[in-house]
Image: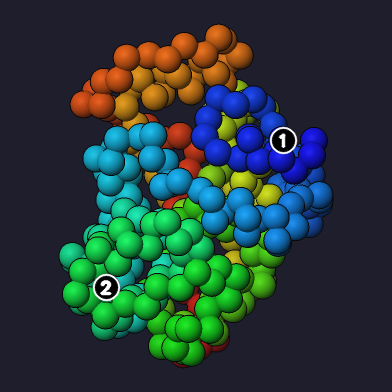
Amino acid sequence: MEFDRLREHWFGFFKGNVFFSYARCTGCGLLFCPRYFSSDALGRLYSEMPDNMSIVATDALEATQRGYFDVLKKHSSLAGHYLEIGPDTGLFTQFAAREGRFQKFWLFEPNLRVHEKLRATVGDLAANISTQMFGFDDAPEGKVEVAVAIHVLDHLLDPMASLRALRSRLAPGARVLFVTHDESSALAKLVGRRWPAYCLQHPHLFNPQSIAELLAKAGYRVLETQRTKNRFPVTFLLENGMWAMGLPHWKLPSLPRLQVSLKLGNIATVAEPMGMA
């Protein structure tokens, strides 16, 4: 397909089963796209994105992010400098702002459309918001105590380079939370190539083993890997289910208050930098 046609499939759901072919690394087991968009093309696509998952009720999204935050809380004092990659409107950031004692927020979000909402999320707290996504020069070197990347590693062209760049910003004993899709999940195996994470936005897809190996090579030690729950409106799940099974896609009546929490193929990984004592 030409770029303009691919662009039509970049946003939203139910627009056809279009994605780049994946291959598996025989060394670490990582699933990756040997052929993918250029950096310039990605910049154009991400700069035009609407709010992340804006078609799902905000309270459902917040409940999912709350679960991720609870995983981080078990391992962190929630103090010092805070860095987040791809925070979107700040659905996760809001919990760090409310419950943490952070000195400053360093937020790296390429989508300028959400910067106003993101700024409002941290309120009067000290914050630096940057469009930079593949390097973290704005953040202080060796000072960041908490870093967060929720559904970011799946999107990066060179996750190893980004992980090493992030590590240079981390303080000894820092905690890093990664949330990724799990391509080894039961759901992925059940629906096959119609698994929603097989899409144009993901040049890489992980499983617990491959993300642990990637992190180890980048200089991190995994402290915990946990399968997480996502909260969705029932109608949204039914529409996705019909699409995944190849059934005609019918738009169902919206019932935002009718929601369920399910383990739908995501994993949260908490890690620390090695050799920085």
Question: Between marks 1 and 2, how big is the CA–CA gap?
Answer: 44 Å
Q: Is residue 33 left or right of residue 94?
A: right
List x then y, in percent, for residue 26: 81, 51
> In the drawing, what numbered circle is on residue 78?
2
Q: Quadrant of the N terminus?
A: top right
List x then y, in percent, for residue 160: 66, 68
Q: Secondary structure at mark 2?
A: loop
| Quarter occupied by residue 198 | top right
Mark 1 surroundings within 10 Å by alpha-carbon count, few (fewer than 14), some (14 through 19), many (20 or more): few
- What residue is shown at x 51% (from left), y 63% (from top)? 110
Mark 2 surroundings within 10 Å by alpha-carbon count, few (fewer than 14), some (14 through 19), many (20 or more): many
List x then y, in percent, for residue 164: 61, 77
- What residue is shown at x 51% (from left), y 48% (from top)? 49
133 shown above or below 199: below
Residue 92 appears in the picture as rendered: no
Tell me the colour scheme of the image.
rainbow
Q: Nearer the viewer, residue 51 or 35?
A: 51
223 shown above or below 18: below
Q: Nearer the viewer, residue 144 or 175?
A: 144
- What residue is shown at x 66% (from left), y 41% (from top)? 7
Q: Label 1: which residue?
A: 5
The amino acid type found where label 2 is placed reads: Leu
Q: Secondary structure at mark 1?
A: helix
Q: Is residue 80 left or right of residue 141?
A: left
Q: Nearer the viewer, residue 227 or 90?
A: 90
| Quarter occupied by residue 215 | bottom right
